Image (tube, rainbow, N blue to C red):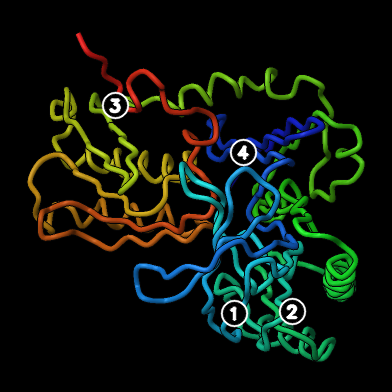
Amino acid sequence: MLEEIIVDEKESFCRVAGLKNGDLREFALWDKNKANEGNIYLGKITKKIQTANGKEGYFINIGVEKEAFINAQEAGLEDLEAHEGQDVVVQVLQEQRAEKGARMTRFLRLAGIYLVYCPYGSEVEISSKIVDSDKKDDLCDLVSRSTEEGGWIIRTSAAGAAKDKILAEISELKGQFDDIIAKAKGSKAPQVLNSKNKIVQEMICHNELSLKKVVVSSRKLKDELVCPVSVEYSATAFNDAGIEEMINDALSRTIKLKCGGRVIIEETRACVAIDVDSGEGTSHGGFGRLNQEAAHEIAKQIILRNLSGKIIIDFAGFAEFKFLKPVINILAEDLADDTFGSRVLGMSRAGNVEIVRMRRRPSLRDLLTEECPTCCGTGRVEK
């Protein structure tokens, strides 16, 4: 859970840094001119294709550099039967990554602070992090009685919210959907119908119990935010908190550990490979201490760097389950609150620990850097 949130907002982009104990734990960059996750578009079908699994898909022009892609078959919806030039309302499910364009969905979700509205859904679901059964029943009854349209997901933040705020958000989200459909009918594709614009507010709500400080570089944003602590204004918020230096550290390939060892992170297109190198670590408590410290650091780096897809970790020492069970437990506990849904799969037959994490946004490296044209990403050049 974060203690401080620092926001640097400009006309075309917004950078948000989350700190805990003075360390950078989360970082997000939202370019308002790009197809960010959650944005809704009126797109135009450009081509129908057969995918590798024998199913059908479509390329869509949504008005950005690379064409987006959508599957014809989606759970809960009728199969898409479209032709070249046809317009369709779609939402960004996964942002553009490397050479791949954004992945889209027709199953729209409109996220609020307390609820997520699924216009084409039919069920009321509730966050598993709300453990009070009476509170769960009360919230589900409140939402079910208040609307018979679409599906709803009750977020963790709703547990501490007043009923009138939840009811107001139901009305607001339904109004957003009505506006989107009305705009789609009167627009020419490609066209942005709705941009996700509550990133800072969502981060505040996710961390409201632990939050101690919020600093923003925009006076307008300061007046708009609803926050359990006072919101401060500083035109140089990032520089004052030393965020730029922290970001540079977060792009480093190697992280040194207090016990003398180090963690080495390699991002590839197929997977993320992480190696725990003992170095001098075995002189201060053996491999057990080294691996446990590394496990805490790896969980932190997965969220901070937004590492996703397949993550393979080679811990130091003996590749036996009895030695690696404690570090597997640490990874599972530290990633339990990950909003992107990390799953620690355990130890593979080769002795590595494997994690899978939902890929929705580019990694920190892909957001802030690009491949070197000289070495083409290898980090090596000819002699």
Picture coordinates of residue 180 (x, y %)? 84, 67
Picture coordinates of residue 266 (x, y %)? 30, 35
Picture coordinates of residue 24 (x, y %)? 54, 33
From what the image shows, is residue 145 above or below residue 257?
A: below
Which residue is label 3 attached to?
A: 378
- Where residue 192 is drawn, which disc sits there? none
The disc, 2 or 4, on the residue closer to the chain's N-terminal end is 4
Q: Nearer the viewer, mark 1 or mark 2?
A: 1
- Where residue 18 is drawn, which disc sits there? 4
How packed mark 4 is, by other alpha carbons closer than 10 Å (few <14, some 14-19, many 20 or more), is many
Which residue is label 1 attached to?
A: 80
How packed mark 3 is, by other alpha carbons closer than 10 Å (few <14, some 14-19, many 20 or more), is few
- Closest to the observer, 369 or 278: 369
Identity of the amino acid at label 4? Answer: Gly
Please identify the residue farthest to the front as the structure is shown: 84
Judged from the image, the secondary structure of the residue bearing numbered disc 1 is loop
